[in-house]
Image (cartoon, rainbow, N blue to C red):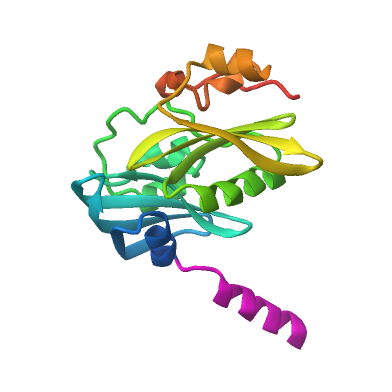
Amino acid sequence: MIVLALTAALVAQSTPSIPEVVQNTFPTLRATAVRSSQSFAVAQASGILESYHFHGEVLLERFSFGWQVIDLDIHGISHCMLTSHGAPGAVASRLASQRFELSYCGIDQRDYGAQNDIDSVRRLAQSEYDEAVSSVIVWKDVAVINWWGAGGGMGTYHRVSGAWKHTGSGGGCLPAATISEMYGMPVSLARHVGCEKDSVTPAPAPSP
């Protein structure tokens, strides 16, 4: 029991706090007030982002390796933004500050795939992008991510000999049909990260 307690304490010490995660992701932003649940957190943040003054909120989600920035909005984090990332309605109601929903209602920005694969890809992405990693989809041995903040784009990862490797990145987005053709995944799944992801919630993706 003592060993377990010491291990938990060491893990807690080595895991960056929410303000530290925000600053590690966006070095020019400083997080102040934080409100959180077990799996989601919202931090007020201010600073310079892409040559503009940012005074808004940052959305984070907790994964096996700790917290990660998944979205941000100068107007504040809305209820629909939270639910679009998979937050339960009660959690969204407690954490949301922006009631003007903009275009987030109906978006499906949830991750797709085995959770251990999602966590592995997200952990790699966190070390490679100083950006929010919005969505991750895993289809067989390929993963596609959305990243944005000071700009935005997509990244690809492939499973090679059992380990995920970063294999490509670029600005902007690709249509779902193009992603489907490139990686052999269903269009319904590609919509989670494609240019059409701000359309009506996609139909559930089929199992691999």
In which quadrant of the rendered image does the C terminus lie?
top right
- Note whether 28 is above or below 180 in the view shown: below
- Residue at (38%, 47%) from the top-left corner? 93
The one nearer the camera, 152 or 63, is 152
- 201, 123: nearer the viewer: 123
Q: Is residue 26 visible?
A: yes
Q: Quadrant of residue 101?
A: top left
Residue at the image position 71 percent from the left and 39 percent from the top: 114
Q: Position of residue 22 (x, y in %)?
A: 39, 58
The majority secondary structure of the magenta stretch comes to helix
Q: Would you say 1 lies left or right of 29 here? A: right
Closer to the camera in the image, 45 or 125? 125
Answer above or below: position of 78 versus 181: below
In the rendered view, tell whether residue 165 sits above or below residue 208.
below
Q: As drawn, is 177 to the left or to the right of 115?
A: left
Q: Is residue 4 a member of the stretch shown in magenta?
A: yes
Observer-nearest residue: 5 or 176? 176
Query: Residue 147, located in which quarter of the rendered image?
Result: top left
Give coordinates of residue 165: x percent, y percent. 67, 41
Q: Residue lying at the far bottom in this picture: please name it.
A: 2
Residue drawn at x 45%, y 52% is: 60
**For this view, does 113 lie left or right of residue 127?**
right
Q: Residue furthest right?
A: 161
Residue 29 position in % (x across, y down): 29, 58
Q: Which residues are magenta?
A: 1-17
Residue farthest left in this picture: 53
- Let me know if residue 189 is in the magenta part: no
Q: Quadrant of the N terminus?
A: bottom right
Task: Inspect this view and state whether residue 1 appears.
Answer: no
Q: How many dots with numbers?
A: 0
